[in-house]
Image (cartoon, rainbow, N blue to C red):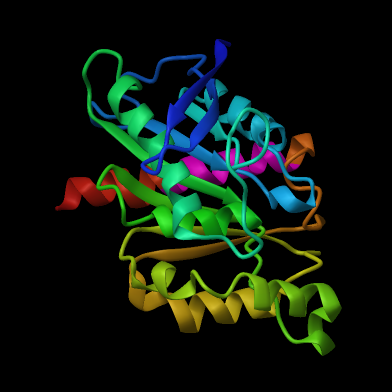
Amino acid sequence: MRAHVRGVDAEDGTRVELFVVEPTTTRDGARGDDATDWFILLHAHPKLGGDRTMMTPLARALSARGYGAVCVAARGTSGSSGSSSWRGSASEGMDACAAVDWATKTGGGDGSKVRAHVVGYSYGSTIGAWALDKREAIASYVAIGYPRGGSWWNCGVMGAAAKWLMRDHFETLRASSKPKLFVHPSRDEFTSTATMERFVREKLQSGGKTELRVLNGHGHFTVTDDDDAVATIAQWIEEFVRRVVVEGEGED
């Protein structure tokens, strides 16, 4: 498995560190077209200890399935310059766009078309929402442990805080018609399963194909480092991309 670190510049000049994991195997013909798929992975809140290393297990799992993966270091973490915000911002979304630009320019290798898929964990899913419709190459969006939050009597202080902190990007997410997959840990400490089911059913279906998968037995903080959870998430992501994105393009 080939992996390397490189730096790119966001549109505002912020230096963004990327940890790039090349595909371990080739998948010629496996997708039914000649495109190359790359996954842009965005980690949890940098002000609460999140950094790009927490996405490495998923990056390697996707690489083993024949896909390229890029772990983006949020502003102010690892080798990235600048500083992050508490609630996420459009400028931080540009860091994800910088990773997409790198993948589309170099990820094809042989000149093939590159499809990019934004995968955000927790806070990273709010950053991914800002980027979703900023690049045509972004074909889908995956949120793991999306911090929808809830009322304090359902989810406690953590849920109420998440709902307040992460609300700004919601309209951007709903307005996008690109396919969306939500992976929700059944024991998530910020958002109940019932809240996520209602959120997807009532709030997002008007914005393109949207699906919810519930990862049983896991909490918010275990889904990116547990081997079984990571393997399941990688499988679900691959199935979603093949069925909704690739087959959907073939129907156009």
- Viewer-proximal residue, 47 or 187? 47
Q: Is residue 15 above or below residue 48?
A: above
Q: Residue at x 32, y 48 (%)?
A: 245
Q: Is residue 217 shown left or right of residue 8?
A: right
Q: Is residue 46 shown left or right of residue 134?
A: right
Q: Does the segment drawn in magenta span residue 176?
A: no
Q: Does the segment drawn in magenta span residue 238?
A: yes
Q: Position of residue 63 (x, y in %)?
A: 53, 23
Q: Position of residue 103 (x, y in %)?
A: 37, 28
**Exactly how many numbered labels are in the figure?**
0
Q: Residue at x 23, y 29 (%)?
A: 113
On the rendered image, what quadrant is the N terminus found in? top right
Q: Position of residue 226 (x, y in %)?
A: 79, 39
Q: Is residue 63 above or below residue 127?
A: above
Q: Quick one: which residue is furthest to the left in this view?
A: 252
Q: Quick one: which residue is furthest to the top in this view?
A: 2
Q: Residue at x 36, y 42 (%)?
A: 11
- Viewer-proximal residue, 224 or 165? 165
Looking at the rendering, which quadrant does residue 143 occupy?
A: bottom right
Question: Which residues lie in the magenta part?
Answer: 229-240
Q: Position of residue 112 (x, y in %)?
A: 22, 22
Q: Residue at x 70, y 31 (%)?
A: 53
- Specify the principal SS of the magenta part: helix
